């Protein structure tokens, strides 16, 4: 590496500069205060854990996303967290171990081996909330509501809520006679909504009626009409209807979109899956779902539902705003001046001392002494 490229960072790894860092921190505080107002308790999870626990229960995708290293103390393999949800599940099941409902939230950076999208970050700042110990649909509705409140708090404007249910797909694949490789091929084709590929991989399926229903899943997305004439998974469809009614009542300005072939997180989700979208951005800005019994690998199988978002991705969608203005103060030992500086800072103002006599460019006001009284004046 030459001296000309020592400043380069790996692809997908970026620093957050002052103007953006201030906005990230402001939004982080607002969101954690929001979750606190709903009764969610903050957790701070470790950056690294043994992979035995870090990669348990949430599917194979997490394994490929996780950087691994050898612990020089124990000789065991550790992973740098690529997702915080499994850590929270472990804490609920083992470290807390409390009965009844647990409401937990978090905010922290994760490191992933590859970005979630072409221009995405491998170092997102994840913020989210998880609810354990309640299997009712009311718990899912609470989490979906918090996800929508999160997007609203970020000021992203009109939101579309995407709803799906993995139970619909599972009901069609149950007892189908397809082996695991064939089921994986069906899954991949359905996720791409590729009808030619789907027809090809479903050819071994002897049940022509079921084959047609699986093919139709690729086009089962849109408004409420997609829930009509679904002759299977009645319980899952009923849950989608109930969630739609509750969210429409609470958030009448939110558009609701159904996708019965949505299989995001299929490896570990057990029921409803949901995501929030905003106009002009093709990726979900927040997503989540139900993932019951993940804590079983930690000794306690618990109902679970939750969501998360990436703070940096949220702010990338917002217009840049200027840094907060500041007040310039002279360097000196005047007691009255320092008392006034303390008062201003205590009131939330930024006061910057002019160490060399030069005024910081962020300052639009100055502290001056008029007849023994320190006053703030426009520069």
Image: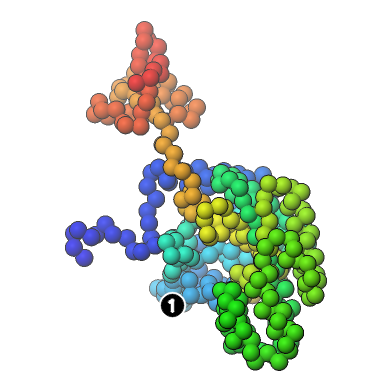
Helix, strand or loop at disc 1? loop
The reply to whether residue 134 is visible in this rendering is no
| Figure check: 180 above or below 42 | below
Residue at x 43% of width, y 42% of height: 320
Residue at x 48% of width, y 65% of height: 116
50 vs 234, nearest the viewer: 234
Q: How is the image coloured?
A: rainbow
Q: Position of residue 34 (x, y in %)?
A: 62, 45
Residue projecting furthest to the top: 371
Q: Position of residue 98 (x, y in %)?
A: 71, 61
Provide the residue designation for mark 1: 75
35 vs 278, nearest the viewer: 278
Q: Exactly how many numbered labels are in the figure?
A: 1
Residue at x 43% of width, y 69% of height: 113
Q: Quadrant of the N terminus?
A: bottom left
155 vs 114, nearest the viewer: 155
The reply to whether residue 200 is visible in this rendering is yes
Residue at x 74% of width, y 51% of height: 248
Determine the image quadrant of residue 289: bottom right
Q: Quadrant of the C terminus?
A: top left
- From the viewer's perspective, tell me whether residue 110 is left or right of residue 379: right
- From the viewer's perspective, tell me whether residue 353 is left or right of residue 94: left
279 vs 305, nearest the viewer: 279
Q: Position of residue 170 (x, y in %)?
A: 70, 78
Q: Position of residue 100 (x, y in %)?
A: 76, 60
- From the viewer's perspective, tell me whether residue 309 is left or right of residue 136: left
Q: Residues within 10 Å of mark 1 (few under 14, many from 20)?
A: few
């Amino acid at each position: 590496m030459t001296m000309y490229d020592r400043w380069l960072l790996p692809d997908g790894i970026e620093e957050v500069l002052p103007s953006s860092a201030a906005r990230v921190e402001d939004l982080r505080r607002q969101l954690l205060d929001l979750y606190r107002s709903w009764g969610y308790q903050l957790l701070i999870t470790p950056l690294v854990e043994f992979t035995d626990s870090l990669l348990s229960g949430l599917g194979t995708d997490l394994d490929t996303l996780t950087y691994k290293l050898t612990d020089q103390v124990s000789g065991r393999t550790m992973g740098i967290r690529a997702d915080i949800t499994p850590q929270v599940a472990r804490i609920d099941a083992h470290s807390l171990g409390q009965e009844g409902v647990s409401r937990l939230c978090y905010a922290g950076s994760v490191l992933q081996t590859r970005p979630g999208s072409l221009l995405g970050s491998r170092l997102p700042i994840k913020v989210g909330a998880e609810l354990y110990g309640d299997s009712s649909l009311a718990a899912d509705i609470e989490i979906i509501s918090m996800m929508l409140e999160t997007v609203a708090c970020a000021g992203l404007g009109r939101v579309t809520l995407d709803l799906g249910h993995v139970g619909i797909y599972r009901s069609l694949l149950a007892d189908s006679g397809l082996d695991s490789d064939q089921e994986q091929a069906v899954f991949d084709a359905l996720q791409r909504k590729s009808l030619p590929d789907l027809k090809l991989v479903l050819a071994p399926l002897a049940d022509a009626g079921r084959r047609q229903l699986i093919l139709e899943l690729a086009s089962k997305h849109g408004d409420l009409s997609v829930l009509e004439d679904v002759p299977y998974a009645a319980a899952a469809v009923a849950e989608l209807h109930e969630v739609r009614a509750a969210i429409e009542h609470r958030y009448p300005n939110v558009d609701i979109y159904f996708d019965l072939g949505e299989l995001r997180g299929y490896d570990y989700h057990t029921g409803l899956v949901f995501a929030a979208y905003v106009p002009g951005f093709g990726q979900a800005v927040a997503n989540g779902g139900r993932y019951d019994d993940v804590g079983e690998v930690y000794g306690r199988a618990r109902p679970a539902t939750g969501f998360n978002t990436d703070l940096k991705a949220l702010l990338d969608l917002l217009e840049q705003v200027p840094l907060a203005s500041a007040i310039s103060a002279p360097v000196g030992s005047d007691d009255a001046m320092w008392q006034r500086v303390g008062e201003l800072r205590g009131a939330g103002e930024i006061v910057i001392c002019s160490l060399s006599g030069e005024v910081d460019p962020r300052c639009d006001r100055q502290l001056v002494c008029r007849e023994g009284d320190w006053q703030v004046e426009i520069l």
